[in-house]
C-alpha cells in the first residue's frame, strides 16, 4: 500500500478510535481535564494497530504494541496530571478489544461449525492476551519498588 | 509477677479508652474511603494506598488492609489498642471522576499530616459522593452509540450498518440505565441489553436493506457487523484491566475475582447473542 492511501486510512481510523474512546470515557465519568488526552491516546493506539496490520504484522502483535503505547503514554500523562493511570489507559484500550473474532466464534458455534468457532475463539484469546501483555509490559517497565506518593 | 507486668498497659484506662475511640473514628473514615474506591472501580493496590494515606494523615500509622471486589477489611492499631472491621461492598460500577477525587483528597491529606480531622474528611467524602456525574446521561447515550458506530466503521461496514450499530447501542444503553436504576441483577441486565441491542441493530439494517434491491438474507444480517458492533458497549473493559493490575501487584484473590466477574459478563453477552440468533433463525426460516 502506498503512503497516501495508508495515511488517509490512518486518519479515518484515528477519528474512529477517538470517537470510540470518547464514548467510553464519558460513560466512565473521566474528568473533563483528562478527557482530551484519553481520547487522543485511544485514537493513537487504534492507528498504531492499523498501521502495523497494514505492514503485515499479525493482529495480536499489532494490539500488543498499541496497548504498550497506551500504557506508556498513560503513565507519562498520569504523572503530570497526578491522577490514577487507569483514567487514561482503560478507555484508550477498549477499542482494541477483539469483538469481531469473539462474535465470529459465537456465530460459528451456533451454526455447528466447531472448528471455525474454535479458530475464532483462539484468535480472540490471543488478542486479549496481547492486549494484557502490552498493558502489563508498560506497567512493569514503569514500576518501582517505592510506593507512589 | 514480672512477666505479667510486661503485658499490662501501664497507662490509665482512660488513655486506652481514648485510643479505642480515636481508632473507631478513623476506622469509619478509612472504611468509607475504601468503599468509595472499590465501588468506583479502583484496583485493590490503589484502594489500599489511598486508605493508608488517609489513615496516616489522621494519626494512625499501623494499618493493614485486605481489599477484594466483594469486601474491604481494615485493621488499625495505635498505642496498645487494635481495631479490625470488615465491610461488604455491594453493588459497584465505574466512576473514574470519583476515584480521582478521592485519590486527590488522600494526597492533600498526606501532604499536611495531622491538620485534618475525621469530621472534615467525612465532610469532603460526602461532597465527593454527592457530586453529580460530570456528563449527562443523554450525552453518554449519544456518545456510546457513536462509539459502537465507530467500531462498526472500523470493521469496514457501510453507512446503513453504522446506523444500525448506533441505534442498537443507544437504545441498549438506555435500557441499561433503566435496569441499573431498578437494581436488576447483572446477569439479567447484560443478557437483556445484548438481546435488545442486537434486535434493534438487526431491525434497522433489515429495514434499510428492504429499501434497496433484493430481499436480504436475515441470518447474514443477524451475524453481520452492525449487530456485533451494537453490543460492544457492554464489554467489561474496566474489570478486565483492573484484574490484570491486581494480579501483577500480587493481589491474586482480587485479580482472579475480577477476571471471573469479567468472564461472567462476556458469557452473558454470549447467551444474549445466542438467544437473538435463535429467534432470528425461527422468525426467518
Image: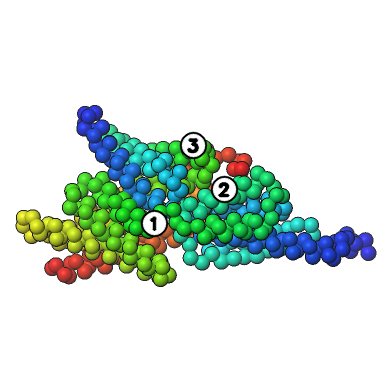
Q: Residue at x 8, y 60 (%)?
A: B215
Q: Of residues B108 and B242, which is closer to you in this image?
A: B108
Q: Residue A76, labelled with which disc? A: 3
Residue designated by label 2: B104
The answer to whether residue B272 is left or right of residue B10 is left
Circle 1 or circle 2, nearest the eye: 1
Percent of width and height locating residue A67: 40, 42
Q: Is residue B261 placed above or below A35 in the rendered structure?
A: below
Residue designated by label 1: B136
Residue A61 visible? The answer is no
CA distance separating discs 3 and 1: 29 Å
Chain bearing tag 3 is: A
Residues behind callouts 3 and 1 on a single chain: no
Q: Quadrant of the N terminus of chain B?
A: bottom right
Circle 3 or circle 1, nearest the eye: 1
Percent of width and height locating residue B105: 59, 50
User: What is the secondary structure assignment of the residue under circle 1?
Assistant: loop
Q: Of residues B6 and A85, which is closer to you in this image?
A: A85
Q: Residues within 10 Å of mark 1 (few under 14, many from 20)?
A: few
User: What is the secondary structure assignment of the residue under circle 3?
Assistant: helix
Residue at the top extreme, as displayed? A3
Q: Residues within 10 Å of mark 2 (few under 14, many from 20)?
A: some
Comes first in the chain, label 1 or label 2 = 2
Q: Of residues A128 and A42, which is closer to you in this image?
A: A42
CA distance separating discs 1 and 2: 23 Å
Chain bearing tag 1 is: B
CA distance separating discs 3 and 2: 17 Å
Residue B236 visible? The answer is yes
Residues behind callouts 3 and 2 on a single chain: no
The answer to whether residue B16 is left or right of residue A146 is right
User: What is the secondary structure assignment of the residue under circle 2?
Assistant: helix
Chain bearing tag 2 is: B
Amino acid at each position: 500500500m502506498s503512503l497516501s492511501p495508508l495515511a488517509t486510512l490512518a486518519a479515518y481510523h484515528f477519528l474512529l478510535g477517538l470517537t470510540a474512546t470518547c464514548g467510553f470515557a464519558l460513560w466512565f465519568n473521566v474528568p473533563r481535564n483528562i478527557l482530551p488526552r484519553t481520547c487522543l491516546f485511544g485514537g493513537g493506539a487504534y492507528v498504531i494497530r492499523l498501521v502495523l496490520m497494514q505492514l503485515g504484522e499479525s493482529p495480536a502483535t499489532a494490539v500488543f504494541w498499541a496497548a504498550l503505547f497506551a500504557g506508556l503514554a498513560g503513565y507519562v500523562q498520569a504523572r503530570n496530571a497526578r491522577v490514577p493511570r487507569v483514567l487514561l489507559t482503560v478507555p484508550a484500550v477498549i477499542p482494541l478489544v477483539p469483538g469481531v473474532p469473539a462474535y465470529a466464534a459465537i456465530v460459528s458455534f451456533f451454526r455447528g461449525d466447531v472448528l471455525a468457532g474454535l479458530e475464532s475463539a483462539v484468535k480472540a484469546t490471543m488478542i486479549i492476551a496481547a492486549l494484557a501483555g502490552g498493558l502489563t509490559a508498560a506497567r512493569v517497565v514503569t514500576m518501582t519498588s517505592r510506593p507512589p506518593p | 509477677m514480672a512477666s505479667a507486668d510486661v503485658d499490662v498497659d501501664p497507662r490509665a484506662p482512660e488513655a486506652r479508652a481514648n485510643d479505642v475511640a480515636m481508632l473507631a473514628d478513623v476506622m469509619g473514615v478509612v472504611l468509607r474511603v475504601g468503599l468509595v474506591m472499590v465501588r468506583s472501580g479502583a484496583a485493590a493496590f490503589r484502594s489500599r494506598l489511598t486508605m493508608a494515606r488517609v489513615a496516616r494523615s489522621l494519626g494512625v500509622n499501623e494499618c493493614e488492609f485486605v481489599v477484594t471486589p466483594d469486601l474491604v477489611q481494615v485493621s488499625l492499631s495505635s498505642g496498645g489498642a487494635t481495631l479490625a472491621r470488615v465491610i461488604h461492598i455491594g453493588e459497584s460500577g465505574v466512576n473514574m471522576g470519583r476515584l480521582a477525587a478521592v485519590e486527590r483528597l488522600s494526597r492533600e491529606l498526606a501532604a499536611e499530616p495531622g491538620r485534618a480531622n475525621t469530621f472534615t474528611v467525612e465532610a469532603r467524602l460526602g461532597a465527593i459522593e454527592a457530586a453529580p456525574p460530570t456528563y449527562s446521561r443523554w450525552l453518554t447515550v449519544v456518545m456510546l452509540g457513536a462509539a459502537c458506530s465507530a467500531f462498526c466503521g472500523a470493521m469496514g461496514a457501510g453507512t446503513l450498518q453504522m446506523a444500525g450499530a448506533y441505534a442498537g447501542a443507544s437504545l441498549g444503553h438506555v435500557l441499561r440505565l433503566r435496569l441499573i436504576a431498578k437494581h436488576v441483577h447483572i446477569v439479567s441486565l447484560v443478557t437483556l441489553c445484548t438481546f435488545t441491542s442486537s434486535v434493534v441493530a438487526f431491525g434497522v439494517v433489515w429495514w434499510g436493506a428492504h429499501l434497496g434491491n433484493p430481499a436480504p438474507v436475515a441470518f447474514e444480517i443477524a451475524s453481520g457487523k452492525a449487530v456485533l458492533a451494537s453490543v460492544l458497549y457492554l464489554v467489561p473493559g474496566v474489570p478486565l484491566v483492573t484484574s490484570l493490575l491486581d494480579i501483577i501487584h500480587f493481589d491474586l484473590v482480587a485479580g482472579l475475582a475480577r477476571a471471573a466477574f469479567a468472564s461472567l459478563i462476556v458469557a452473558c453477552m454470549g447467551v444474549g447473542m445466542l438467544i437473538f440468533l435463535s429467534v432470528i433463525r425461527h422468525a426467518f426460516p
